[in-house]
Image (spheres, helix red, strand yellow):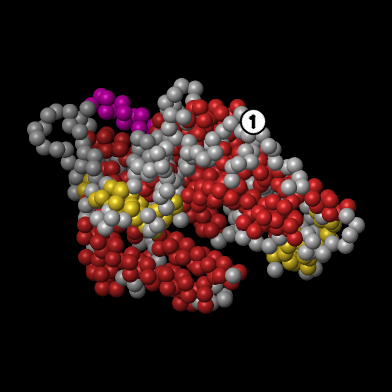
Amino acid sequence: MYGDLANKLILEAKRTQQLSQAGFTKQQLPTYQDEIVRGILKEVGSLKKNVDYLREQQLANQDNKVAQCQYVVAMLSMERNKRCLLAYQKMRSEILDSMIWDNNGMEFSSSVSTHPNTPSFDSSVLSHPEQEYLKEYAQLLTEMKSGELSEIDLTGTLDPPSDVFIDVRVLKDAGQIETEYGVFNLIKDSQFFVRQSDVERLIQQGYLQKI
Amino acid sequence: MDIDIDDILAELDRDTTAVEQNSSSYPDQSDDTRGANDLALLKSAANTEITVDPTSNKIEDYQKLVTHWRNERMSPELLPYPHHLMARTLVRIQDRMEFIETLSMGYLEDSRELTVDSKLPLLCMEAELERLKFVVRSFIRCRLSKIDKYSIYLRQQSDSPEIPGFNRLDLLMSKEEVKYHMKHSNILLKLFNSSVLKHLPEELQAINDTEGSISMIDEPDWNKTVFILVCGGVLDETGVDPKLTTDDDGKPCYSVVIEELNEEIYLLIGAVYVIRYSVIVELMKDGRVILI
Amino acid sequence: MGYYDIDDILADGTRFPCRFNYEIPGLGYLEGNTGRPISKHSKLELPLWMVHLLAVVGAESGEDSGAEEPLPFVELLPPELFAPRVLNAIKSGAASLDLHSISPHFYTLAERWATLFSDKDLSQVLKDMLLERGQEINNYAVSVSLFSHRGQTNDSAVFLQTLDEFEKSVYRDTNVNCKEMKKWLALK
């Protein structure tokens, strides 16, 4: 029946939403359901043909209840399909947005990661328009961060700062990290007593853990 | 806590020339951007050089910023951007960062043995700066997320200017936010168009269609329930609060009307209420009531 | 609520029983019989997004058929969802009811139905139910975060499965809030 494919897509969107709420979409999205989307668009195409035909019928015969009913059903089905398609796309775009905010747009400029041990993002799960959107939004964010707001570091942590200096433990090997106040050798399980603002970025990326 | 730090910092301040001594021409108290002065205010904010008036109280500004931050987080709609307050705050942040840098350079060159104690003023300044940066960051991020959420609704608001050549959004948002809004809605529309809309028949290609069963434009929830604290204290030129009345017991309060119940209620000064946003929105924008 | 809200869209897909007031050829596929017309008075289950308009819109006649209003294409019949059996089960034991099995979008649908038919009784039942179940949700959410280090016990997992989508989001919010509160108090 009309709208069944759309329901499938929405269930997929719901699944994605649940993954996102559980925190599994920080680095990865489920694959774009190109086939289902195209199927729905085809369905809309054939509904449109029905609608055009029915409109002609209505003009010819005002009192045609049958045509009116069929017309309403076809229009509602088209609207339903449109709504499902857009909701699916919006859900995915919102997850892409939060990925960029969390990761500071760093690893997405190329699909090859520049930092060792960083899981590289697989952009084949995105459709072409989505890949473009990702690039453009990352660029927009970089622009926002420079300018008069550069000092406050828009993508910085949203946890209130507690102490100036904190104990951190290294979770992953990351070689040498140079900060403004010295060079640190990040070896797994070693601990450091450092200024919180320096290492905020590394904590966000998962290299360090605050103790 | 803040006041103690400020004492320490005032000691240091006397030795440096970080703060400009020029007086500025813009008004200090009003970050209220409504009314007939809007156009003039906007022009002044755009044209005058941003210098910090030393008489503007740092502590008061900080408290105002925190109130704005709190209100913004709790409110369902995007509140007007406090242009002047933010400009002063950002300048202060910039100045303080430079100041700390010069100070710590001084420490590095110093060959005396440094203990944590002797670096205490520096640490205090850094801690305070981090806290301020955090508040600003959280404030801006909250606003950006609302701009994203109500993107089409805001677009609609800007499409009907009351004064030609004057974009209402310029008052509501900072320059950067307006840019962000425009660019983000453009690239998002491009995404929707290329993946869905352009493949649909003509009559379904709109993104802001309100004719169908459900309106495509998401509006803020005006009936959202919020917690408020009635603080009052907003006086006009004659030193009197025009909205203040007294209830049957003679206690000072504000009177509001709940439309659905057709009931008038009194909000006592100093009390906390749980109430619909639409009922108190005017009072909040005046500053007589804050969201908590 | 919202055009893009996934739960709203899913709720709209719920099927409701209805009866056709006219014979409409070409819509046989709705019944599963493509090619055959839907006969007058035939009963079938249609999704809410289709029914809510068909139940309101009627056939417009070209001729003046007197003072009679055109009959809507479809008439909504009382669904199982809000049958007396269900309402009684709610009234007698809301807290232990398996709401998910009745409908995963019970609250949303009940709100819509009550608004459509100005059903005051239904909205009263709904309010009382929310109050009772809300306390139960609160109990589980708070105890899970405070007393169980592993995050979830068997009881709470079973309880979660009986909640509908709206209640699940309430549970989630309560849980998260509790954990954050605990963390903040520990800092002090």
Asked which quadrant contains residue B240, the reply is top left
For the point 72% across and 48% down, which residue is it?
B13
Q: Is residue C112 left or right of residue A121?
A: left
Please tell me whether the stretch drawn in magenta is mainly helix, strand or loop: helix
**What residue would you read off at disc 1?**
B49
- Residue C104 can be seen, yes or no: yes
Q: Where is residue C16 in the image (x, y as percent from the top left)?
A: 29, 54
Outermost residue toward the top?
B164
Magenta region, residue range:
A49-61
For the point 71% across and 43% down, which residue is it?
B95
In the picture, the quarter occupied by the C terminus of chain A is bottom right
For the point 48% across and 54% down, which residue is it?
A14
Compared with residue B16, is residue B170 higher up or lower down, i.e. above or below?
above
For the point 75% across and 60% down, which residue is it?
B120
Q: Position of residue A26 (x, y in %)?
A: 62, 55
Q: Position of residue B104 (x, y in %)?
A: 80, 52
Which chain is mark 1 on?
A: B
Residue sitting nearer the eye, B227 or A118: B227
The total of numbered circles placed on residues is 1
Asked which quadrant contains residue C63, the reply is top left
Query: Which element carries disc 1, helix, strand or loop?
Result: loop
Residue sitting nearer the eye, C32 or B192: B192
Q: Position of residue C70 (x, y in %)?
A: 16, 38
- Residue A93 can be seen, yes or no: no
Mark 1 Cα shell of 10 Å, populated few (<14), some (14-19), many (≥20): few
Compared with residue B181, is residue C168 higher up or lower down, i.e. above or below?
below
Residue sitting nearer the eye, B187 or A36: B187
User: What's the amino acid at mark 1?
Assistant: Glu
Q: In this view, does C96 lie to the left or right of B105?
A: left
